[in-house]
Amino acid sequence: MLTGCSVDANPGAYTTVDSIFANADKDRIAAHVIAMSAAIDAPRETPAMRSRAFIKVQDGCNHRCTYCIVWQARGVSSSVPVSTVHDRVRAALDAGHGEIVLCGVDLGSYGRDMGTNLAALLESLLDMCGVSARIRLSSINANDVNESLIALNAHPRLCSHWHMPLQSGSDHVLRAMHRGYRRAQYLRVARALRATNPATEFTSDIMVAFPGETDDDHAETLSLVDEVGFLQGHVFRWSQRPGTPATAIAGRVDDASARRRSAEVRRATRRTGALSLARACGRVHEVAWDAVDGDAAHGLTAGYHEVIVEGAAEVRQGSLSLVRAEAVEGDRLRGTLLRS
């Protein structure tokens, strides 16, 4: 069985696959799988609840990034109706999820096709959360973070973690990529979010060796990584994707240089991530529990730091607790559960 962007972007290419579903037909996958499954009479255990509820509120993309095929494969942005999102969030809260993650291909464009926007949706969902749950955004572009969203970053039930894809710190490269922001805007948004909540953390996607990228462009990316101070960075080298405009851009970066630049950005994000962990140490964090293994509990802070706590067998997966971070252990925090 096959689905995803490649199905839409390459019609007729997969002739040896038994079942193919375009993105628009994904709602038929579950019924197809059930129909294919052999009947099992033996009783089965109920699957464990996912710790966090991931709720997709948007699909498609209104951007036209030159390295990407998604906007061609999925079409323009389409939003899930507000009432449907509310129903899904209420169901997740009733099931005991302490954290709701709003997902979308182009999340910042939510609601524009329906006369509303992401900030308005967020406000309504934050009101639903009360004190026992919180909301996290999966990913959003810097040019979609407006004043209303920046103001909401001070809300105690919105996770102070923003995954904002950077791709490059160079205006020359960002322009060639057709990204909708420039270096100054990205930095301005990051500063504004931290001004509303100093505990705000950033993670990002960073691409190196885009066609035409020079050593000076690469240096601008490195300097921006330091200036923002990312907790984590997903770093990858540009690679040719048939059908994307970037394949026609001159100035390919040689493989050795691409690998060197990738390693340098990875080192930079590891360095800033270590500084972020050090800042988080000694503070009290609200943690959403991802797993409980014996008496050790693993979870995520609102700022997206990984935490492990020993002697916390009583916590429930998916719930929220307060934890004091007492030490840095590799790329995570070790803490103590604050019991009421």
Image (cartoon, rainbow, N blue to C red):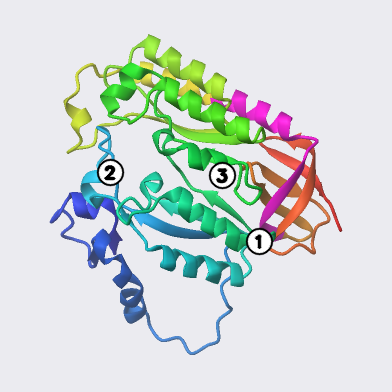
Residue 160 spot, x, y in % from top left: 61, 42
Q: Does 289 lie within the magenta span?
A: yes
State the residue at coordinates (64%, 36%).
Answer: 197
Vertical order, 244 against 51 (above or below): above
45 or 26: which is nearer to us? 26
Residue 40 spot, x, y in % from top left: 45, 86
In this figure, which residue is indicated by the disc labeled 2?
62
State the residue at coordinates (60%, 35%).
Answer: 201
Q: CA distance from mark 3 to mark 2?
A: 24 Å
Q: Is residue 314 left or right of residue 90?
A: right
State the residue at coordinates (25%, 62%).
Answer: 24
Q: CA distance from mark 1 to mark 3?
A: 15 Å
Going by the numbered disc 3, the residue's amino acid type is Leu
**Quick one: SS at disc 1?**
loop
21 or 164: which is nearer to us? 164
Disc nearer the start of the sequence (1/3): 1
Disc nearer the start of the sequence (3/2): 2
Instruction: Classify residue 82 by image quadrant.
Output: bottom left
State the residue at coordinates (29%, 23%).
Answer: 175
Q: Is residue 65 visible?
A: yes
In this figure, which residue is indicated by the disc labeled 3?
152
Residue 254 spot, x, y in % from top left: 30, 17
Q: CA distance from mark 2 to mark 1?
A: 33 Å
Vertical order, 136 against 207 (above or below): below
- Disc 2 and disc 1 in contact, CB within 8 angstroms: no
In this figure, which residue is indicated by the disc labeled 1?
130
Disc nearer the start of the sequence (2/1): 2
